[in-house]
Structure formats: C-alpha cells, structure tokens
Amino acid sequence: MTPPAEVSDTGIGPYPSDGARKLHLRTQFFRLAWGISPAMCMRITNLGSQYLVAAADKEGRTLDGGRHYTVSLPLASRPPGSGSLTAWDNQTRSMLDTPQRFSKVGSQGHPRRAATADPDGSTTVHFAPELPDGVPDGNWIQTTPGRGWCVCLRLYSPLQPFFDKSWRPGELDEVEI
C-alpha cells in the first residue's frame, strides 16, 4: 500500500501509505501481459492490435479505486479502429472484481452496453466506485475503494491516425467529488 521508495544520490526516501495498493508504474504492463505477440508490436495499418496502458493520472499519481477519473477519446475519426478500455486490478492482474462484472467499455455492445458518444462526437469514460449522476452505464467502469488499478486501451485493426499520432486519447483526469 506504499509506493516504491525514491532512490537518489542522497539516499532512499520512503513514501507514506495513502491506502491504495500500488505497483511500480514501469512494470505494470509486464505484469499484465508477461510478453508480447508480433501483432502487438508491428506497425501495420488496419491489422493486429495496439495497447496503451496507464497506471497514473495526468499529474503522475497512481490510480486509486476510491476516486473518480475521466478520460476523453476524441472524435477525430473515432478511435482509429474498434477498441475498448478495460480496467485491471494491480494485485491480481485480472479485471476489477466489482458487482459490475465486466470492467470494460467499448465500441461494441458485448458483454456490456456500448459507450455513448458525447454531443461533440468524442466519448468520455468515467472510472469511479459508484455510477456518477447523468453518466450512461456504458460509459462507466466501476472501481473499488482501497485498491489500485490500471487501464488498457485496446485498439483492434488500428488506422493510420494512431500510428502518426494525429489521434491521441486524453489524459486521465481526477474529478473532485
């Protein structure tokens, strides 16, 4: 429940526990995937898949299941290819264990409802312990207070805007409750 200590020329500086289980951000994807397949690292438009993982908000703070976050996926020809966002438990490397059952939202309506676009065509996804007021169920991933988590954006058959970075997902923003 304590982040890894900061190691510097002056010594080791421990951090206090803030109540959320944590893993070192740089090892998170390795812990999830344990390796790669050729399709995960090839840059071929409209083929294979690409994965973007975040374990911290835009301020660099580890994601905490007791807080509310949003991420915006801009319209710009939608996510370049079909895709989904899935939240993973830092300790088990499994989808979050919540009453919601499937901690994912996406462009397809299975096993949960597809996400609903905002009026400007972008899509906003919410991560919070409870469904925020006015947010469609298909745009919410339930988190668990006291547990750390990370999120993976999966893009299937990604298009050129992903590779040339003309399409980029937004940062994870904490919403003050």
Image (cartoon, rainbow, N blue to C red):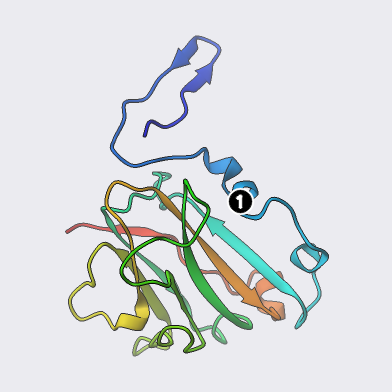
Please state if 90 lies on the left or on the right of 52 as rendered. Answer: left
Please state if 46 lies on the left or on the right of 69 as rendered. Answer: right
Q: Residue 135 falls in which quadrant of the image?
A: bottom left
In percent of width and height, residue 91 lies at: 47, 46
In percent of width and height, residue 36 lies at: 75, 57
In percent of width and height, residue 26 lies at: 59, 41
What residue is drawn where x is 42% and y is 83%?
112
Residue at the farthest top position: 10
- Asked whether residue 164 is in view, the answer is no
At mark 1, the secondary structure is: helix
Mark 1 is surrounded, within 10 Å at the Cα level, by few (under 14), some (14 to 19) or many (20 or more) other residues, namely some
Q: Nearer the viewer, residue 175 or 135?
A: 135
Three-letter residue code for mark 1? Phe
Q: Residue 130 falls in which quadrant of the image?
A: bottom left
Q: Is residue 139 above or below residue 39?
A: below
In percent of width and height, residue 64 lies at: 33, 49
Residue under circle 1? 29
- Asked whether residue 143 is in view, the answer is yes
For the N terminus, give its image quadrant.
Answer: top left
Q: Residue 82 falls in which quadrant of the image?
A: bottom right
For the C terminus, give its image quadrant.
Answer: bottom left
What residue is drawn where x is 63% and y is 83%?
81
Q: Is residue 14 above or below residue 161?
A: above
The count of marks equals 1
Please state if 127 lies on the left or on the right of 55 as rendered. Answer: left
